[in-house]
């Protein structure tokens, strides 16, 4: 394999930047974005927001985009997605495809039906949820309807019509979705398909309906349009499809229909962490399965998802023959110029794979954003700030994520920035969060922000206060407060009865704060009792860190379920598998330690000498004693105060991040970006 030296862009010696033939089209390099939910569509049509999003990444050098999901039938429609079966979508589609083509890229349309994973309450009201067989949906818990022969005929026509509409709208190809536990995959998989008719049982029968949909698409669009499949390469379930069975299915499909490419995926909704892999999953989790499909299908392009360990490993995927295209989808959400920067060896902004800004937002019904890139979804309004009247000298107090991001953006926009950090290092709480098992990717954000702060006057070990700022000989025009947060004094944490006793107990020997538990694991002597009154990814990180350090852990939470505020990220199942140390779980915690959860409960007493704690059920009032030598208080955080009394009224103050209100990394980065954007740009340089 040839690697292009830094600074060179010779496509002939760089496998990542060689063109690729896919059916009757040629793409300019081997970097693609697979289909991903954004919820940008408006009333079932592509929106200007979507066009701006794709256009920006086409400008950044990406060769191929898969636009999806585009639904083939109203029984699967969701607000924010395109209704692929509607003939009135063509004009909006044409605006999207023209914008992508003008920038030198190609775009395919992914066609899908969610089947059992469709929400039972659609845009127009309640509706039946179809599947291969009657079952409870693993995504929604809804009872499904077994699709009849007539239903299947309607769905097949929906795929064909949606493909026809896509071609009329200017798409270069269409992709038939047979993965992720959606309808076509449900017929393929023994986890869903228990039918006894000609659509169930043998592999040939289970492939019958997906094959009919694929054949109808090919017949409708002809041979001049690229037609591919999104295909599961392995279900990673003892009762599901194995790698060899997936290879057989691909063989069978190819025997009957011309397929121009294979786009791979893994898992399904019984193992949803494979569908939406987070930072806790190995980065190249599907590499071996992708390579197996490529070996078996050497004559057509294979797209590798989950095949690259890092963005820099993309060349290895191509050069080693693992796949023909590399899907770095979230990486290109975070860094729209990824292709350009990989080609020129420029540093990139890294995705940290926490799924909070992208998947968690769409999972909660909100348009997709990005933790590390606040411009995502706002390309038309946030790419370039207004012209600033003059350069301003801005003091930033705090070198955590909010302070660093504010400083980076202000400097990028031409302002003069002095950043004060009380500690001897930058990063704030990010440095602590990166110690949580499975979240070490947060270090990438610290490194990126620190690197990008070149040109900022950084003063470490300086605890800036109002007097220092007011007395500075080099006058500041503005001050941004980004002092962050800390574990709350418990009498000020949560104003409810569940928290009142914690204030008295917090001073006892053996009681530690959440931060101490992560930073000083040697303090944890088992059995350990975690008291969670937070319920966010913050407290789930505390649980992961404690469970990794201690063998016997019990978590009690005042909520009626553990970690109730992480639903949108689809990480709950994977989190529990790791905490309970389920064998074979990717990114599993070490050891065989016990873990238990009690919901709707709080701590009322702790006897460190007897190594016993008393917990109370918040509904029944029942109390009981449990073993505990250490208690970890995972209670909400409070802002680190900044006294402004001595600050001259002439110096405007802006508060960002946790100093404004303790929230997520997303909020800290977003606050800081917005504050800096409001200052405007001194020159014509872009803020993005």
Image (cartoon, rainbow, N blue to C red):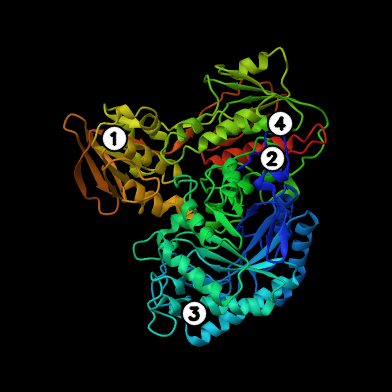
Residue count near mark 2 (Cα–Cα under 10 Å), binned few <14, some 14–19, many ≥20? some
Residue count near mark 4 (Cα–Cα under 10 Å), binned few <14, some 14–19, many ≥20? many
Q: Quadrant of the N terminus?
A: top right
Q: Earlier in the sequence, mark 2 or mark 4?
A: 2
Residue at image mark 1: 631
Element class at badge 2: helix
Q: Earlier in the sequence, mark 1 or mark 2?
A: 2
Element class at badge 1: strand
Q: Residue furthest left?
A: 610
How far apart are labels 1 and 2 at the CA level? 48 Å
How far apart are labels 1 and 4 at the CA level? 43 Å
Element class at badge 4: helix
Residue at image mark 2: 341
Q: Residue at x 73, y 40 (%)?
A: 9
Q: Quadrant of residue 395?
A: top right
Q: Residue at x 25, y 50 (%)?
A: 621
How far apart are labels 2 and 4 at the CA level? 22 Å
Position in image of residue 90 (x %, y %): 74, 71
How far apart are labels 3 and 2 at the CA level? 44 Å
Q: Which mark is residue 410?
A: 4
Q: Residue at x 77, y 39 (%)?
A: 686
Q: Earlier in the sequence, mark 3 or mark 4?
A: 3
Badge nearest the viewer, 1 or 4 = 4
């Amino acid at each position: 394999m040839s690697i292009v030296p830094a600074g060179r862009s010779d496509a002939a010696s760089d496998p990542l930047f060689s063109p690729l033939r896919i059916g009757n089209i040629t793409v300019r390099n081997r970097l693609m974005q697979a289909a991903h939910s954004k919820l940008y569509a408006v009333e079932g049509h592509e929106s200007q927001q979507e066009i701006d999003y794709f256009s920006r990444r086409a400008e950044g050098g990406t060769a191929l985009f898969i636009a999806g999901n585009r639904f083939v039938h109203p029984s699967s429609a969701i607000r924010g997605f395109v209704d692929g079966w509607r003939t009135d979508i063509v004009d909006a589609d044409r605006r999207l495809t023209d914008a992508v083509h003008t920038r030198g890229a190609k775009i395919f349309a992914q066609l899908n039906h969610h089947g059992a994973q469709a929400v039972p309450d659609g845009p127009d009201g309640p509706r039946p949820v179809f599947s291969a067989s009657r079952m409870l949906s693993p995504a929604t818990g809804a009872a499904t309807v077994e699709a009849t022969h007539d239903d299947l005929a309607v769905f097949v026509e929906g795929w064909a019509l949606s493909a026809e509409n896509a071609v009329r709208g200017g798409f270069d190809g269409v992709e038939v979705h047979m993965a992720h536990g959606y309808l076509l995959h449900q017929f393929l998989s023994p986890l869903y398909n228990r039918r006894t008719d000609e659509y169930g049982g043998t592999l040939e029968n289970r492939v019958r309906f997906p094959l009919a949909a694929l054949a109808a698409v090919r017949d409708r669009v002809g041979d001049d349009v690229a037609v591919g499949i999104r295909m599961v390469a392995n279900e990673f379930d003892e009762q599901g499809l194995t790698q060899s069975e997936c290879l057989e299915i691909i063989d069978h499909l190819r025997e009957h229909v011309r397929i121009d490419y294979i786009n791979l995926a893994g898992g399904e909704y019984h193992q949803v962490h494979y569908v939406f892999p987070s930072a806790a999953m190995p980065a190249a989790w599907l590499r071996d399965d992708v390579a197996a499909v490529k070996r078996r299908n050497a004559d057509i392009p294979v797209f590798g998802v989950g095949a690259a360990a890092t963005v820099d490993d993309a060349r290895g995927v191509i050069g080693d023959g693992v796949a023909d295209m590399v899907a770095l989808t979230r990486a290109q959400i975070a860094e729209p110029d990824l292709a350009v920067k990989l080609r020129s060896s420029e540093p990139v902004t890294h995705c940290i794979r926490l799924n909070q800004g992208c998947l968690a937002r769409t999972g909660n019904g909100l348009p997709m954003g990005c933790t590390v890139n606040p411009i995502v979804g706002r390309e038309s309004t946030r790419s370039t700030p207004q012209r600033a009247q003059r350069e301003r000298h801005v003091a930033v107090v705090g070198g955590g994520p909010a302070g660093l991001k504010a400083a980076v953006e202000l400097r990028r926009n031409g302002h003069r920035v002095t950043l004060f950090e009380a500690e001897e290092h930058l990063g704030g709480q990010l440095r602590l969060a990166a110690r949580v098992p499975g979240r070490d990717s947060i270090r990438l954000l610290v490194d990126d922000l620190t690197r990008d702060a070149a040109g900022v006057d950084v003063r470490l070990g300086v605890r800036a206060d109002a007097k220092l700022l007011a007395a500075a000989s080099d006058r500041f025009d503005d001050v941004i407060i980004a002092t962050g947060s800390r574990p709350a004094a418990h009498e000020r944490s949560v104003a409810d009865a569940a928290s009142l006793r914690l204030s008295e107990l917090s001073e006892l020997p053996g009681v530690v704060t959440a931060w101490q538990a992560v930073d000083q694991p040697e303090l944890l002597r088992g059995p350990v009792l975690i008291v969670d009154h937070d319920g966010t990814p913050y407290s789930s990180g505390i649980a992961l860190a404690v469970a990794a350090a201690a063998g016997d852990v019990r978590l009690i939470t005042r909520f009626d379920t553990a970690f109730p505020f992480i639903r949108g990220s689809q990480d709950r199942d994977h989190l529990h598998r790791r905490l309970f140390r389920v064998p074979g779980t990717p990114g599993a915690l070490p050891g065989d330690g016990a873990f238990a959860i009690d919901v709707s409960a709080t701590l009322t007493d702790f006897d460190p000498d007897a190594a016993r704690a008393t917990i109370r059920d918040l509904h029944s009032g029942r109390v009981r004693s449990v073993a505990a030598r250490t208690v970890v208080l995972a209670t909400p955080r409070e802002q680190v105060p900044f006294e402004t009394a001595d600050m001259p009224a002439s110096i405007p103050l802006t508060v960002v991040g946790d100093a404004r209100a303790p929230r997520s990394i997303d909020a800290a980065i977003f606050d800081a970006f917005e504050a800096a954007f409001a200052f405007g740009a001194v020159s014509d340089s872009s803020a993005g």
